[in-house]
């Protein structure tokens, strides 16, 4: 477990269990008294997310945004958190950024329905503010169980927040992108690219994003 994550957990008063040997597989934040999603099936997991009150974000949500797509997808897309439109519709990436994401996926030969799309957070932060580390830590066990159930061949992390959280890194997105990285103990290949909302504001970054998309496509193709 990274020092950054340990610090967040310590600040939140969450006990951290570290393994003695060099195996990170079970070093996850554990909330006292809360049922953990570790062994849940899809129905149990989606029900747990729907009813979740583990952090303060549940108070402001219209509904949770669980994730959408094939549950045996080769490619999993992970964004930051639902925005206003996602909160209304209950589906990730349905606003303007979502339309661009669909086009990006099409450009590398994936229909939206073929991949699985989720976020670090399942509830919308107020005024679309950045997720707080405590919120991300509380919500990550849901995402981790989704990843375990899907077993994607590759993960595409969209934007700085998702990239830094998933990689437990403070490094700027410009340096995290462009290379194949790995997600946690699972070692699933992970590629970082710019968030589509950023690409809408900064279209000059699309060339670099295209390189990232080709990289992730290549991983999936080679895994067939
Ligand atoms: N931005 C995200 O990171 N996720 C969404 O679902 C929508 C916008």
Image: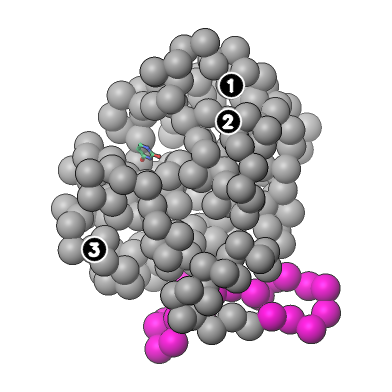
Q: Which residue lies furthest to the bottom in this view?
A: 33
- Residue highlighted by disc 1: 209
**Which residue is more in the foreground, 168 or 155?**
168
- Residue highlighted by disc 3: 58
Q: In this view, does 126 lie to the left or right of 188?
A: left
Query: Residue at coordinates 44% horizontally, 87% vertically from top-left?
Result: 32
Q: Contact, CB < 8 Å: mark 1 with mark 3?
A: no
Q: Is residue 207 visible?
A: yes
Q: Contact, CB < 8 Å: mark 2 with mark 1?
A: yes
> Is disc 3's CB within 8 Å of ligand 1?
no
Q: Where is residue 57 in the image (x, y as percent from the top left)?
A: 26, 61
Q: Looking at the image, tell me whether mark 1 or mark 3 is earlier in sequence order.
A: 3
Q: Is residue 139 visible?
A: no
Residue 95 occupies quadrant: top left
The answer to whether residue 35 is magenta is yes
Q: Residues within 10 Å of mark 3 (few under 14, many from 20)?
A: some
Q: Looking at the image, tell me whether mark 3 or mark 2 is earlier in sequence order.
A: 3
Dominant secondary structure of the residues highlighted in magenta in the image: loop
Marks 2/1: CA–CA distance: 6 Å
Q: Looking at the image, tell me whether mark 2 or mark 1 is earlier in sequence order.
A: 2
Circle 3: element type: helix
Q: Give the range drawn in magenta.
A: 18-37
- Residue highlighted by disc 2: 193
Give the number of callouts. 3
Q: Position of residue 207 (x, y in %)?
A: 59, 12
Residue 140 numbered mark, or none: none
The answer to whether residue 106 is magenta is no
**Which residue is more in the foreground, 55 or 143?**
55
Q: Residues within 10 Å of mark 1 (few under 14, many from 20)?
A: many
């Amino acid at each position: 477990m990274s020092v950054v994550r340990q610090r967040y957990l310590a600040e939140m008063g969450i006990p951290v269990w570290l393994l003695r040997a060099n195996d990170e597989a079970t070093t996850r934040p554990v909330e006292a008294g809360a049922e953990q999603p570790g062994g849940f099936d899809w129905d149990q997991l989606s029900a747990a997310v729907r009813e979740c009150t583990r952090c303060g974000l549940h108070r402001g949500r219209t509904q949770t945004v669980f994730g959408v797509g094939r549950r045996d997808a080769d490619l999993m897309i992970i964004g930051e958190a639902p925005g206003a439109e996602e909160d209304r519709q209950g589906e990730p990436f349905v606003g303007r950024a979502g339309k661009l994401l669909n086009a990006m996926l099409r450009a590398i030969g994936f229909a939206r329905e073929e991949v699985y799309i989720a976020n670090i957070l399942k509830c919308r932060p107020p005024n679309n503010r950045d997720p707080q580390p405590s919120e991300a830590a509380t919500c990550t066990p849901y995402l981790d169980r989704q990843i375990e159930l899907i077993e994607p061949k590759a993960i595409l992390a969209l934007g700085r927040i998702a990239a830094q959280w998933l990689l437990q890194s403070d490094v700027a997105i410009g340096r995290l992108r462009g290379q194949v990285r790995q997600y946690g103990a699972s070692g699933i290949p992970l590629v970082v690219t710019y968030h589509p909302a950023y690409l809408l504001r900064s279209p000059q970054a699309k060339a670099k994003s295209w390189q990232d998309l080709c990289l992730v496509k290549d991983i999936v193709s080679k895994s067939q």
